[in-house]
Image (cartoon, grey):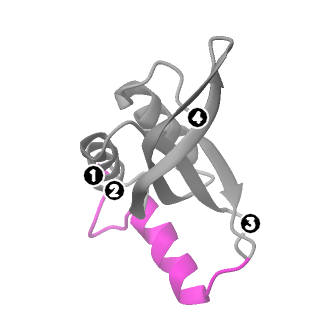
Amino acid sequence: MTDDLLRVTTATPDLDSAKDLARSAVAGRVAGNAQIIGPVVSVFRHLGDTGEGEEYQLVLSTTRTAYPELAELLTANHPWDNPEITAIPLAVATDAYATWLRESTTGSADEPRE
């Protein structure tokens, strides 16, 4: 079963911000891994106007249990006031990957969560 595994995304204005958020999430054991994609072009509506710009997409893997803490970390450390932070469930994953992700975000007796 993978109904407890999530893929979380957000975007940042620059590569350094994406790396900082990724490192913090993985080091804090609220994400098992993070991938940074970009730059990507984004077209959006903001404050009543449309805009366009380059962003870096940050994709993180986590569990439903760790998600609230991950969302809090991303929100508190994000350079934008109201970042898009979304999560979708993973429909399927290998048993080995699912086990690794759960262990990476919860720790074990030898590796307690920070």
Secondary structure of the residue carrying tag 4 is: loop
Q: Earlier in the sequence, mark 2 or mark 4?
A: 2
Tag 3 secondary structure: loop
Q: Secondary structure at mark 2?
A: helix
Q: Position of residue 38 (x, y in %)?
A: 41, 56
Query: Crowding near pointer 1: few (<14 within 10 Å), some, many (20+)?
Result: some
Q: Earlier in the sequence, mark 1 or mark 4?
A: 1
Q: Are marks 2 and 3 in contact (CB under 8 Å)?
A: no
Residue identified by numbered label 2: 26
Q: In the rendered image of this protein, does residue 66 appear above or below residue 35?
A: above
Instruction: Give percent across and percent down for residue 1.
Output: 73, 77
Residue 110 or residue 51, whichever sits in front: 51
Point 43% across, 36% down: residue: 74
Labelled disc at residue 23:
1
Residue 16 figure quarter: top left
- What residue type is disc 1 on? Arg
Q: Are marks 1 and 2 in contact (CB under 8 Å)?
A: yes
Give amino acid for label 4: Glu
Crowdedness of circle 2 by 10 Å Cα count: few (<14), some, many (20+)? some
**Foreground of the two, 66 or 112:** 66
**Disc on res. 3:** 3
Kind of residue sitting beneath label 3: Asp
Query: Could you say whether the residue bearing mark 1 is in a helix, strand or loop?
Result: helix
> Which badge, 3 or 1, comes first in the chain's sequence?
3
